[in-house]
Amino acid sequence: MGALLLIAAGFLAGYMESHKLTVRVEKLEAFLRFLSSSRAEIRYSSMPVETILKTHGEGIAFFSRLQGAGGSGNWMETWKKAVSEHAGSEGFSRKDLDLLQGFGTGFGSSDTESQVAHFSLYETLTASAVNEARAERDRKSKLYLMLGIFGGIAAAILLC
């Protein structure tokens, strides 16, 4: 019975690591959808930052931390703080956090045409990150599962 529990624990550890890769892809895809829909909204209606976050920010929980920050006058600091404190726990990698930080420095800080160009740039960068995350998930997901199972089996054999 103990050996089966060790194998199950190994499988679960492998599954958790594999799941992190899937969550990263989902979060990057949500950010890409946000960029695409927000760019169109900015181009045609010139909505304020808070309204854009509220309207198009589904799937990205740290956006809720930014509500009410636009009136404080310290938008970039609030963005950086929200990214550093909360986005890391959502499944983004360090490279993704750097991408989010870079996006936040130009978000809401210029005229409509510059914002559209900013969103287009970060759409391209995020699409590249999504493709990279998918490739990493496809490459490493099964590996983590197998390492977890075989690690559990090895621990069971050594302890039995």
Image (cartoon, rainbow, N blue to C red):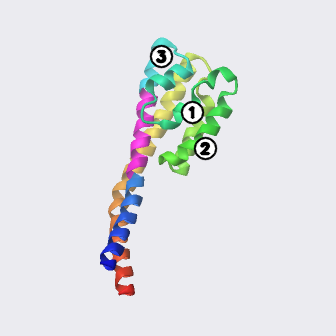
Q: Nearer the viewer, residue 155 or 29?
A: 155
Residue at 64% over, 39% down: 81
Toward the top, the furthest residue is: 45
Residue at which label 2 appears: 85
Bin the neighbour count of mark 1 within 10 Å (Cα to Cα): few under 14, some 14-19, many 20 and up: some
Q: Is residue 23 magenta?
A: yes
Question: Could you tell whether 57 is left or right of 71 in the image?
Answer: left
Mark nearest the camera among 1 and 3 is 1
Q: Secondary structure at mark 1?
A: helix
How far across and down, in percent of the image, does residue 40 sit?
43, 20
Q: Looking at this view, is 82 or 92 the one in front? A: 82
Q: How far apart are labels 1 and 3 at the CA level?
A: 25 Å
Q: Residue at x 61, y 44 (%)?
A: 84
Asked if residue 111 lies left or right of residue 11, the reply is right
Give the residue pinned by disc 1: 65
**Do the residues bearing badges 1 and 2 touch, measured as CB atoms within 8 Å?**
yes
Does the segment drawn in magenta span residue 5? no
- The Cα–Cα distance between marks 1 and 2, rounded to whole angstroms, is 10 Å
Q: Quadrant of the N terminus?
A: bottom left
- Which residue in the structure is indicated by mark 3? 43
Of the image marks 2 and 3, the number of the one nearer the N terminus = 3
Q: Residue 125 at what x, y percent from top left?
A: 48, 39
In the image, residue 125 sits, relative to residue 34, either above or below, namely: below
Which is nearer the N-term, disc 1 or disc 2? 1
